[in-house]
Amino acid sequence: MSNSNPALTSEEPSVANSAMGSKAPGAESLAPQSTRIMGRTSYFLAWFGGCVSIGTFAMGSSVVGTLNLLQATLAIAIGCFVIGIALAINGAAGYKYGIPFMVQARSAFGFTGTRIPGLVRAVPAVVWYGFQSWIGAGALNMVSATLFGFDNLIFYFITFQFLQIGLSVLGFQGIKWLENIGSVFILLSLMYMFYATVQRYGDELSASILTMEGSWGLPFWSATMLFLGIYSTMMLNVSDYSREHKKGTKQSLLTTIYAMSILPCTLFMGLIGYMVSEATGTADPIQVFANAVDNTPLLMTTLLFIAFAQVTTNVLNNVVPPTYILMDVFKLKFPIATIIVGLLAFATFPWKLVQPESAAGLQLFVQTYSAFLGPIFAILVVDYYIIRRRTLDISKLYDPSGPYQGVNQAALIATVVGIVAALTFSAISWYASLIPAGLTYFLLMKHWSVCQRFSQ
């Protein structure tokens, strides 16, 4: 399809810049992306640097007493493998056509209907944005208090948040270099933090984490879902990122890139959270590493890593999705939308999420929003692979008065069916939602005349 179609004029006008082979910082657009700025190595490093989620630490804490160490390790690995497959599958449309999530969803949900999956995707992103910003600010505050005697967490939270907003305004040009440069530091720091945790708490770790029977049943599969649930948000809007990846990579290799970039960080952070919480009962990573590291220079390095990792994760995972949603719904420019998202993160009250009792609450949060994200993921996959047979009419996706105008009731009904199934089996909510939602959507699209115009 040609990107010069008149229907594209309703979107951001950066296609012209793309045609000239340049992309200015912050010049992000909902229009089809023709300039791809990330090769395989760069794309791998972007995902590696962007997936150091402190939420994974909390998920590791939440399975203490339920799984033994081997089971926890395998649960993380299986979760990452499922993530890799899901990202490659749902990111195919964005990779092929250069379209973002909010445009991809129009063929299934309709122009107006896409606001529903957009909102469902945006809420957890903003919550994690605030949570991880508070963690990063706490790390900076401890560095300041230790070295300079200045202790003011609120000051650092506000400053840290505005720093991230400033970086976010640069768009994918800034994200690319931030993630690529930071990935080596992140890997080395994670390896050191894991070693320091074992050294510091090795004697206090009870033998039960190795010898306890644990469970290979529902609790085990529930744990795999918790670790993939951290990224279930990104499974939904992966096209926002795959549209930046240069063409020429097969889907099997993309699956490997996704899974292997996410696995190291998720494994280290999850197991650190698991072991530390088992030994100390503490779920606050700042306090954990303050106690684990006795050497002040090394402690400062570790704390700076925690702060830096929150920036790389937030800018990639938690800024782009709600920003594109604001661009689509309110027709805002990318820089303005990123600023609004950054300000919304203040309203999540993140200091409440780092309390000792918060690990269980975060577990419930992941299970709950996964119940809403799973059905939408299934609908997008069925729509692209079965209904459209991997062929999209780009002009219709950008024509608000075309066949995709309004709301596709089939997608809404299928979403509700999937949510009901997910909440019925809340421990494995994401898994439980897939077949009911996907099958319902397929049957309605094939047999309900009301939805026939969306099949075009």
Image (spheres, helix red, strand yellow):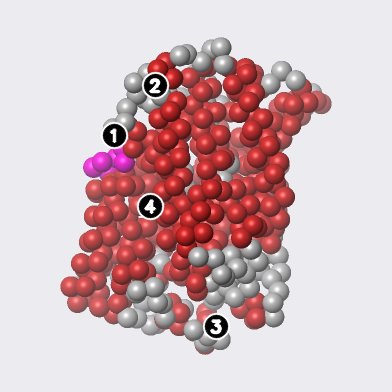
Q: Which three-letter amino acid code belongs to the residue tagged 2?
A: Gly
Q: Check if mark 2's residue and mark 3's residue have beta carbons within 8 Å.
A: no
First in residue order: circle 1 vs circle 3: 3
Element marked by disc 2: loop
- Residue 353 x, y percent position in the rendering: 50, 33
Q: How many marks?
A: 4
Residue occupied by mark 4: 373
Residue occupied by mark 3: 3
Q: Quadrant of residue 136?
A: top right
Residue occupied by mark 1: 218
Disc 1 from disc 3: Cα separation: 48 Å
Label 4 vs label 2, nearer the camera: 2
First in residue order: circle 2 vs circle 3: 3
Classed neighbour count for the residue bearing mark 3: other residues with Cα under 10 Å, few (<14), some (14–19), many (≥20): some
Residue 15, disc: none
Judge whether 378 appears above or below 150 on screen. Answer: below
Residue occupied by mark 2: 65
Q: Which residues are magenta?
A: 423-428
Q: Check if mark 1's residue and mark 3's residue have beta carbons within 8 Å.
A: no
* Residue drawn at (50%, 49%) of the image: 259
Classed neighbour count for the residue bearing mark 2: other residues with Cα under 10 Å, few (<14), some (14–19), many (≥20): few
Element marked by disc 1: helix
Q: Which three-letter amino acid code belongs to the residue tagged 1?
A: Leu
Q: Which three-letter amino acid code belongs to the residue tagged 4?
A: Leu
Element marked by disc 4: helix
Asked whether, in this view, residue 198 is left or right of residue 390, the answer is right
